[in-house]
Image: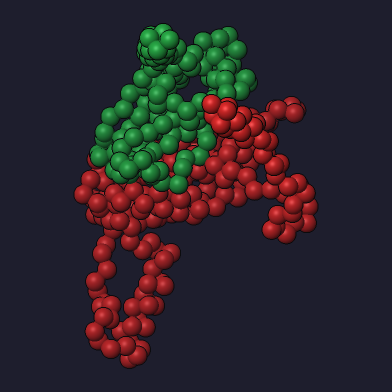
Chain colours: A green, B red
Amino acid sequence: MKRFLKYSLTAGLLVAASALAQAPIPGYAASAGIASKLSVRGSLQGLQVFDLRSQVRNEVIVVQAEIQNLIEGDSRLYYRFRWVDSGGMQVGDGEVWKPLLILGRQSQFIKGTAPGPKAVDFLIEMSAEPR
Amino acid sequence: MRIIKLSICALLLAGCAVPEPPPRDVSQPVVRFTRQTSYGDSKAVETVTNQFGSTDLQMIAEKMVGSLLEHPAITGRPTLTLSSVKNKTSEYIDTKSIMNSIQTQLVKSGKVRFVRSMDEMQSGVDELQRQNQSGLYKSQGKAKMGQMTAAKFSLEGEIVSIVKQSVSTKDVFYKMTLKLYDVEEGAIEWQDEKEIRKTTQR
């Protein structure tokens, strides 16, 4: 009985580990790395972030994301950047939600600049509705 | 063995216990005249009308601050001052409020220092004169005359709008332009624009 339990537990752990390793990438992100930088509220209505890059300019982080509308219908995206310091605390007062109309099968860039040199990491908060 | 069984039953029963529902109809410590008013998200997108609104102000300020922060012109924490922003639109827009938002975010970034603008100068001069000419203050700790720091750069701008209207559609296009002038040289060191289109259909 003990041996059976031991094998069952090991098998369960292995299945869980492989499930984690092969966690499906959400449809709104082109890769798991991009998905980790997004905080999405509900469905993104066919929108997908397929490129995300950042660089430091004049001591502040500048982030650029390319968003593609994968469907024929237009979508209205609402987004904002959230910036945190090295201790994980929010930098600044929080950005305003910005609306962006993305036509069917169109791609658009969004860009964000950190509010100061204290910001070392970011998250893009997104929400979308059909036009 | 019996004790173990009883313990397990007790644990299961404890686990199944339903938490007491929160009390309802409890009033909140708020004085309200109507239930229609509520506090909302100050950062939400406002589309009540197509006139210049809070979202436009915040988006303009964010765009300008972001663009300026990543520009090498402000390397070395230079001194800036606010100059005029002309409102060339057909509606009333508090351009001072836009510039105040930009100034606040730039000051909080720690990348620049602001000195008194033309509008703020008189109150500064009054305070200096009070400390130096009233004879009320001891000399130690008194702010000295002639020690103000001059601005290296000044921020100037303008906002314009184009309005088109038909029977069913009204389209408003705003464009805010901001320039950073080197005061000594008179040269533009940085310049950017923010465009906003708002369309209303009946």
State the image coordinates of residue A130 (x, y, percent, origin top left). 62, 19
From this view, report whether residue B22 is shown above or below residue A29.
below
Q: Nearer the viewer, residue B88 or A131?
A: A131
| Residue positioned most to the left | B76
As drawn, is B201 to the left or to the right of A49?
right
Q: Position of residue A69 (x, y in %)?
A: 51, 14
Q: Is residue B106 left or right of residue B27?
A: left
| Image quadrant occupied by the C terminus of chain B | top right
Judge left or right: residue A117 versus residue B24: left
| Residue visible at 37% across and 83% down in the picture | B130
Q: Quadrant of residue B83?
A: bottom left
Q: Nearer the viewer, residue A8 or B53?
A: A8
Q: Nearer the viewer, residue A32 or B88?
A: A32
Residue B158 visible, this angle? yes
Q: Quadrant of residue B113?
A: bottom left
Q: Quadrant of residue A13?
A: top left
Give me the residue at 51% from left, 16% from top: A47
Residue at (24% x, 74% y) in the render = B146
Identity of the residue furthest to the front in this view: B1
**Residue that lies at the very extreme toward the bottom in this rendered image:** B135
Percent coordinates x, y for residue B41 in the rendering: 59, 43
Q: Is residue B176 visible?
A: no
Apparent side of residue B154 relative to residue A19 in the rendered image (left or right): left
Tell me where residue B53 appears, x and y as whole percent.
59, 43
Query: What residue is drawn where x is 37% and y is 77%?
Result: B127
Q: How many marks?
A: 0
